[in-house]
Image (cartoon, helix red, strand yellow):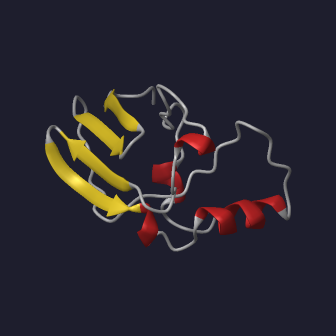
Amino acid sequence: NWYRPNLRVKNRDGCTPIGPWRVDAADVADPMQLDLQTRVDGVVTQRGNTRDMIFDIPFLIEYFSAFMTLQPGDLILTGTPDGVVDCPVGAEVVTEIEGIGALTNTICRGNA
């Protein structure tokens, strides 16, 4: 992403909300068959499935392992389904993955 215009909007201090829990690989029957959904203030803005990813999870693990050491607990952030939207300050964003759970965040103004 270094040479792409989305670098600025995807990488900001405090802007990688993760949690509130992690799921072990053994708890996910097929990571390439999970429904994804994002809602902003209750309106669905994104819907997708991991089967639609350009690169599957095994490929990404193999690829990254070729030039870095992956440790237990490391995260690989894989991107987002179509339908991104600008969120105003105060918007509630709920991101949900089937069988894993939902993460709720409220957009706040950062320090400039």
Q: Work out whether 21 lies above or below 68.
A: above
Which one is in front, 109 or 106?
106
Measured from the top left, where is residue 91 in percent x and y?
Answer: 22, 34
Give the quarter of the image for residue 95. Answer: top left
Name the residue: 44% across, 68% down.
Answer: 51
Residue at position x 60%, y 38% from top? 24
Decide: is 99 above or below 6. Answer: above
Tell me the residue at 66%/64% (across/down): 58
In the picture, which quadrant includes the C terminus?
A: top left
Q: Nearer the viewer, residue 88 or 17?
A: 17
Residue 83 image point, x, y percent: 27, 62
Please give left or right for residue 73 compared with residue 8 in the image: right
Which residue reaches farthest bottom?
54
Q: How many marks?
A: 0
Residue at x 71% of width, y 60% of height: 61
Q: Position of residue 54 (x, y in %)?
A: 51, 74
Percent x, y for residue 29? 51, 52
Residue 100 left/right relative to 82: right
Image quadrant containing the N terminus: bottom right
